[in-house]
């Protein structure tokens, strides 16, 4: 089974495992990745991606891969890490168009670690 681990906020592919053994991760699971620095991530959602098939095919459609969407996890607090913007808002409330804080009027230039 192919499993692709993706960062929730940036969409960056963190890991692509082409020979995943065992079951798929579940929402809320904590994963430890050893690609570069060892880091812990919490599973936010699982997307099952199937191969292309005819619209009338609903049974036995082959699985293409599983996309696991994750957020950084802080083992010391037991909570996910959410980067803090220099404007004082969490990264999770930012959209590609900008910060949604202060009723969408916040103008933030970048993010820093909390």
Image (cartoon, rainbow, N blue to C red):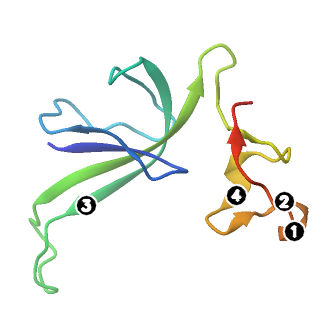
The percent coordinates of residue 81 (x first, y second) are: 65, 32
Question: What is the distance, in whole Å, between disc 2 and disc 1 at their CAs?
Answer: 7 Å
Q: Is residue 74 above or below residue 46?
A: above
Outermost residue toward the front in this view? 109
Circle 2 is placed at which residue position? Answer: 101
Which of the two labelled residues, at mark 3 and mark 2, occupies the earlier sequence position?
3
For marks 1 and 4 on the same chain, the one whose residue lies earlier in the sequence = 4
Q: Quadrant of the N terminus?
A: top left
Residue highlighted by disc 4: 94
Separation (CA) of disc 4 from disc 3 = 27 Å
Frontmost of labels 3 and 1 is 1
User: Which residue is outermost to the right?
Assistant: 102
Local packing at callout 4 (Cα closer than 10 Å; few below 14, some 14-19, many 20+) is: some
Q: Pointer 2: residues within 10 angstroms few (<14), some, or many (20+)?
A: some
Q: Residues within 10 Å of mark 1 (few under 14, many from 20)?
A: few
- Residue 49 numbered tag: 3
Q: Estimate how packed mark 3 is, as few (under 14), some (14 to 19) or many (20 or more) residues with alpha carbons within 10 Å.
A: few
Front residue of 7 and 55: 7
Residue position for label 1 = 105
Q: Which numbered disc flags the more N-terminal residue, 4 or 3?
A: 3
Determine the secondary structure under disc 4: strand
**Tally of numbered tags:** 4
């Amino acid at each position: 089974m192919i499993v692709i681990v993706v960062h929730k906020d940036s969409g960056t592919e963190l890991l692509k495992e082409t020979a995943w053994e065992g079951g798929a991760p579940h929402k809320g699971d904590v994963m430890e990745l050893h690609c570069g620095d060892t880091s812990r991530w919490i599973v936010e959602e699982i997307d099952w991606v199937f191969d292309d098939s005819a619209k009338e095919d609903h049974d036995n459609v082959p699985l293409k891969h599983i996309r696991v969407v994750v957020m950084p996890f802080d083992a010391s607090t037991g909570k996910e890490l959410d980067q803090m913007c220099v404007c004082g808002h969490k990264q999770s409330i930012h959209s590609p168009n900008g910060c949604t804080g202060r009723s969408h009027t916040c103008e933030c230039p970048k993010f820093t670690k909390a």
